[in-house]
Amino acid sequence: MNLVETFRTGLEAVVSHRLRSSLTVLGIMIGITAVILTVGLGEGAQQQVGSEISSLGANLLIVSPGSSTSSAGIRGGSGSASTLTVSNADVLASKTVAPDIAGVAPVVSASELLTAGTSNWTTTLVGSNPSWLSVRGRTMTEGRFISGHDVQTHAAVVVLAPTTASELFGGRDPVGQTVDVAGSPMSVIGVLTAEGSSTTTNVDDQAIIPITTASTRIIGGTSRNNLSSIYIAATSSNTLSAAYQETDNTLLSLHGITTATSADFTITSQQSLLATATSVDKTLTVLLAGIAGISLLVGGIGVMNIMLVSVTERIREIGLRKALGATPRVIRRQFLVEASVLGLVGGMLGAILGVVVAIVLPHFISDPIAISAAAIVGSIAIAIAIGVAFGVYPASRAAQLHPIDALRGE
Amino acid sequence: MTEEDPISLGLDDTQQVRIDDTGTYPAFSAPVIDIEDVHKIYRTGSLEVAALRGVSLSIAAGEYVALMGPSGSGKSTLMHILGCLDVPTSGRYRLAGEDVSTMTEYELAEVRNRRIGFVFQQFNLLASLSAWRNVELPLVYAGVDRSTRKQRALAALDRVGMGDRVEHRPGELSGGQQQRVALARAVVSDPALILADEPTGNLDSVSAREVLDLLDELHHSGRTVVLITHDADVAETTSRTLRIWDGQILEPSSASVTGGAA
């Protein structure tokens, strides 16, 4: 008896016991749907976090003053010290010192009141250089960004983020208008493209002015040469760790520090944030997939149970088939095919249901569900494997039946 | 009487049987069944039950033999061994010239498939399959291709007078009709031996008569038929009756010399 015949016989047995087969299939179907949805939810969350973080720049390093390590009690926390200077940033921008760094944007920032006509708006004022635009991965929707000339001449110009622009000017075109920044009038030269809201900070609400203008006209005082942070873009995400090393070594030697543990600055990367967020999501996915796996296991036990019932119920049929010349191998195959057909049908229906739910459900919950082709193919394969694995024992029981005993129907 | 054509049983040349108009058989044809001193002992725990105690018998090609005995006589055990559903504890069994007493499960399955056609008391048709699908089953396991199977199954059903009910399921047929389908299934693979175990046990007298007539017809067309029964009237219809009692054949071999006398 060839495989086509075996498959036909198995399929006929499944079809001729419709109710029983559909109940078994239902068990597998629910399990597969659960697996597809949990994996989809996990992947969706990971993609969301990933896209949020990469929108900040996957190649980005942030250098903050102060140390994050707290081995000595006298040292302040990250951001509390004032050790980074514009000249530090200039050294890092040199290709000979740091070949893997594509751009350096020293930043001073403060919260300031902006006034345009009768509108007031308090926002984050950022003083930086022309590199800021590329380092932060932003684009202009209108006008131009700060130029090197603006920085050299301490020009009174400002670039607004879209939220800030609409708060100050409403629907009017802000470019060419004048904004009062902490008492100094500055002309608006451009508006940034909206980035979308991030979970941590609103990057669409800020105002950028030349760093020289910020330190001479706005901030002033003793802290005028001290930077809040230096943003550094590596040449690519592959060179990020090289850029990290170059930044670390350069700053240590510039600050005359010999041991890395006593550094007076902290370097963080978006990738380390991404890794943390991803690992949290992975844990969640594994947990949910584990629960889904248990429901699949229950479905598999259902298949085994039904197949055992099927063997007992069809003991006379097995005996007859053996009397007519079916070998144990043929009988075993027939029952294995039945079990795997149950698995296959359950898997396919589960995949369909999973995809439908994945399309419908995000309309009711805020979380995205990412269904990949690999997840669908994989889960159908798992369903067939479950059918076969849990069908092996009933099938071998059927194959071992003695034709006489089977014919008697005992 | 009219002259009949030689009929091939689908066996080797040496086992072909020519029937002449007197209904007798060539004297030197090889026996289909040749059993020598067969013992069968069942062990349940420490208990040993000898179901067969030295059975020897020979059935020639084309014979129609009844195997009679009360329950507990070893009749069923002998039938299982004859049908290659079981192997003897000791002794030798040659079926159509082939020693089957030492065969493995797989070899026995093949022998059953090629050499034996079964007819059971309970019909044993598969309820989910139509009549012709039931009849083609032995050919499925023999690896015959699909169109040939259907053709042969329909021909076999035609022979037993069920040609107009090939698409009916067993549940839609009467007991007698079901047994005729079972008979078609038994002959579809041209086996050397037709083994009928109480084929009329579940039938009313009219249907039983029809089935026995069909068996008689099969015998007259040259087939070897062994009928297991406890009914003397049924045994009457055969050409030779073997009686089994307490694991042994009574009046052994005396009838085999005149085998085939109708």
Image: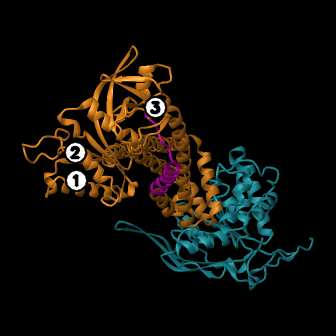
Chain colours: A orange, B cyan
Pinpoint the chain carrying mark 3.
A
The extreme top residue here reads A118
Q: Where in the figure is residue A360, as x and y percent of width and height? A: 52, 32
Whether residue A132 sits left or right of residue A75 in the image: it is: right
Check contact, mark 2 vs mark 1: CB within 8 A. yes
Query: Label 3 sits on what residue type?
Result: Val
Q: Which mark is residue A84?
A: 2
Query: Label 1 sits on what residue type?
Result: Leu
Determine whether the residue tagged by mark 3 lies in a helix, strand or loop: strand
The residue lying at 47 percent from left, 59 percent from top is A392
Give the class, few, some or many, for how many residues have Cα within 10 Å of label 1's Cα (few <14, many ≥20).
Answer: many
What whole-number distance in Å separates the C-alpha atoms at marks 3 and 1?
33 Å
The extreme right residue here reads B2
- Is A369 magenta? The answer is yes
What whole-number distance in Å separates the C-alpha atoms at marks 2 and 3?
28 Å
Pinpoint the chain carrying mark 1.
A
Do we see residue B249 in this rendering?
no
Do we see residue A165 in this rendering?
yes
The answer to whether dots 2 and 3 both sit on one chain is yes
Q: Earlier in the sequence, mark 2 or mark 1?
A: 2
Disc 1 target residue? A251
Disc 3 target residue? A191
Q: Where in the figure is residue A187, as x and y percent of width and height? A: 41, 27
In the image, residue A33 sits, relative to residue B132, either above or below, namely above
Along the line of sight, which residue is nearer the eye, A273 or A353? A273
Along the line of sight, which residue is nearer the eye, B30 or B125? B125
Q: Which region of the structure is painted magenta? A: A365-391
